[in-house]
Amino acid sequence: MGLTLTEKILRDHMVEGESVKGQEIGIRIDQTLTQDATGTMAYLEFEAMGVPRVKTEKSVAYIDHNTLQSGFENADDHRFIGSVCKKHGIYFSRPGNGICHQVHLERFGIPGKTLIGSDSHTPTGGGLGMIAMGAGGMDVAVAMGGGTYYITYPKIVKVELTGKLNPWVAAKDVILEVLRILSVKGGVGKVIEYCGEGVKSLSVPERATITNMGAELGATTSIFPSDEITREFLRAQDREADYKPLSADADAEYDEIIEINLSELEPMAACPHSPDNVKKISELAGMKIDQVCIGSCTNSSLLDMLKVAYILDGKTVDPGVSLSIAPGSKQVLNMIAENGALSKMIDAGARILESACGPCIGMGQSPNSGGISLRTFNRNFEGRSGTKDGQVYLVSPEVAAVSAIAGVMTDPRSLGDMPEFKLPEVFTINDNMVVPPIEEEKMDTVEVLRGPNIKPFPVSEPLLDEIDAKCSLKVGDNITTDHIMPAGAKILPLRSNIPKISEYCFAVCDEEFPKRALDLKRSIIIGGSNYGQGSSREHAALAPLYLGVKAVLTKSFARIHMANLINAGILPMTFANEADYDKVDQMDDLYIANVREQVKNSDIIKITDKTKGFEFEAKLDLSERQRAMLLAGGLLNYTKENA
Ligand code: F3S
C-alpha cells in the first residue's frame, strides 16, 4: 500500500513509536520558529535547559506581535530575544521584517522538513510541503535543545481539489468551505492533505492561506504537495536548491476524503463569532460596514496586495469605512512600493500599517462599539478585536477591498473580468533585517540583555500525592485561550512577566478569579467541552500554574492547550460521565487521594466532591511519557531529570 505525503515525512523523522493512528510518536524537528509574544518565555526556558547552541537545522525568532511600543516592556523583550538569539545560534528577524509565517514561507521554509513554532498558525508552512505545527513555547525550547517532539499519530484527511477558482473567488474561500464542512472541531487529531488536479492552479501563497487557516479546524496541520509551482516559488526567492518534489503515492489510503470542486465555490465570509459560521457573500451583500482590515499571516502576501491595489486603483474608500492594510513582510511592502501598488492604496485612502500582526492581535484598529469589521484574518472570536461587541467577518482580500470602496458587504464578482495576477519571476530579496547568530567560538562574548519586565517563569513542583482543593472556577463550553489569557495591547507586553500577566487570567469570564485562586493557594478549574480552543498560547497554562491551579477537569480539551497544561505540570482530566459536570459547583471542595499512584497506573481518577458528598470518576487520556512528565511536575523538570 502506498503512503500519503504526511506519512512519508513523519516516517522520515520518526525517532520513537510506530505509525499507528492514535498512538504517540516522537519526531525529529528540523526547524523552529517563535514570535515575540510567546518567544520571550520560550527563550527563558531554553536558557534554563543549559544547552549552549540550538541543535536544529534552522531556528528563527520573529518580532511581529508586540510592535506598538507604549512603555519599555516590548523594547526590553525585543532586546532580550535578539541577544539570546545571537548567543545561542538562532536567526533574529527584527521588528519591521514581517509576520513570522509570511517571512518563514518566503525565506526559510523547505519542502519535506518538520517545523514547530510557538504560534498556532505555524501550519502556514504546509503550503510549501512541510509538516509544520503549532506547539507550546516549551516544546519549541526542547526541540531547539535537540529534544524530540511528540504528537499523536494523526488520521489523514484527503481534500481532493478539482476544477479551478472562478475570477474573484479566492484561496480564502477554499478554506472557508473546508471550515463550513468540517467545523472548528472537525480537524482534531487529523492532518488535512490537499491533493488533486485543482492543486496545480494554486500558487504557494494561496496554498499557505489554506494551510494557515487549517489551524481553525483544530487540525494537527495541513499540507500541500511540493511540485513545479513550489519550485517556481523557491526559484523566485533564490532558493531553488531547497526544492524537492513530494507527493502522496497514487494508492495511498486516507481516513476520510472530501471533494471540493473549486469551480463551484463562491466568495464567502465567516460570520461572528466563529470561523466555521460560514455564509456566502451573496447572502450578506448590502450589509453596512464600519471597518476593513487587510493583512495578517493568512492574507498578506504579494499576490493578495496586488489584487487589493487593483481593486482600489483610482477609487476612494467609503466615508463611513476605515480601511487599514498591513503587508505581511518587508519583502511584500518593498515590492508593492517598487511597482506602484502601494501608491494606489495610499491614494484610495487606505491607512498603511507596518508589516506585523497589528489588528489581528489587538494592536490598534479595534472597531467602533458594535462596529462591523471585515477582516482578512483567521479568527473572529468575541472580543479578540479589542471591542467587546465588535462584529468581525473573516473574508478574502478581494471581498475586503471591494466592500471598503462600496461601504457595504459586496460580492467582488460584481467587478466583472479579472486580470491575471501572477507572482513575479524574481522577488526582491534583502535579508538585512535578519540578524545571524554569532559563531559558536565567540558566544561567550555576547551578553544577554534583560530588562525589569523579564521575570523567571514559574517552575511547578512534582505532582502531589494528594490534591485537596476547591474548585476556583467553573466555566462552560468552548472556552478559548483568549478567555483564559486575553491578548491586547495592555496585556501583551507582560508576557515575560507571569506574576503580573496572571492578574488578567480569566478576567473576561470572572474578574475575581485571579485573586480568589491566589488566596486559595491550590485549586481546580472545571470546564465544558473543547476547553482551551484557539491559540498555542502557553501563558494560558503558565498563568493558572502561577495561580496555584493543580488540575483542570473538563468535558473535552483542545489539543495544544492540553499539551501545554501537561508541560506546565497541571493535571488535565475529563469527566467520565459528562452529567457529573452539572453536579459540581464553583467553590466545592474536591479531593483526590493517591494522585501519583493513579496517574502512574490508571486511566481513571477517583474524585470526591466533599461539599456535595459524592464520588465521581474522571478520565486520563495520557501517554506513558505524559504521565512521567506530570509526575515530574512538567516538561522542564522532566527534561532536566532525563538530561
Ligand atoms: Fe499574527 Fe494574527 Fe497570524 S497575531 S501570527 S497575524 S494569527
Image (tube, helix red, strand yellow):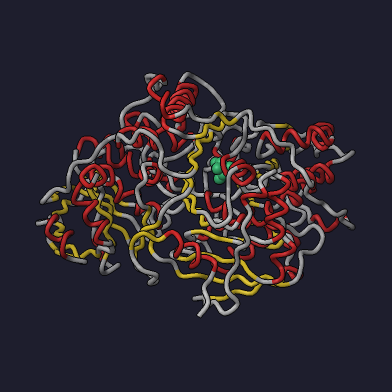
Q: Please say whether residue 45 is visible from this viewpoint.
A: yes
Ligand 1 position by quadrant = top right
Q: Where is residue 523 drawn, in percent x and y?
A: 21, 45
Does 556 appear above or below 395?
below
Which residue appears at 58% of the width and 29% of the height? 95
The residue sitting at 73% across, 53% down in the picture is: 232
In the foreground, 51 or 462: 51
Vertical relation: 599 (above or below) 435: below
- In the visual, does 17 lie left or right of 104? left
Quadrant of the snapshot with the C terminus: top left
Left or right: residue 581 compared with residue 486? left
Q: Position of residue 530 (x, y in %)?
A: 40, 59
Q: Where is residue 468 in the image (x, y as percent from the top left)?
A: 13, 49
Pick whichever, 530 or 192, lies toward us: 192
Q: Observer-nearest residue: 146 or 32?
A: 146
Relative to 461, 349 lies left or right: right
Residue at position x 69%, y 65% from top?
199
Whether residue 449 is visible here, answered yes or no, is no
Q: Toward which corner of the image does residue 138 lie, by quadrant? A: top left
For this rendering, which residue is in front, 424 or 605?
A: 424
Residue 247 lies, with reference to residue 443, above or below; the image says: below
Decide if residue 12 is on the left or right side of residue 364. left
Numbered circles on residues, count: 0
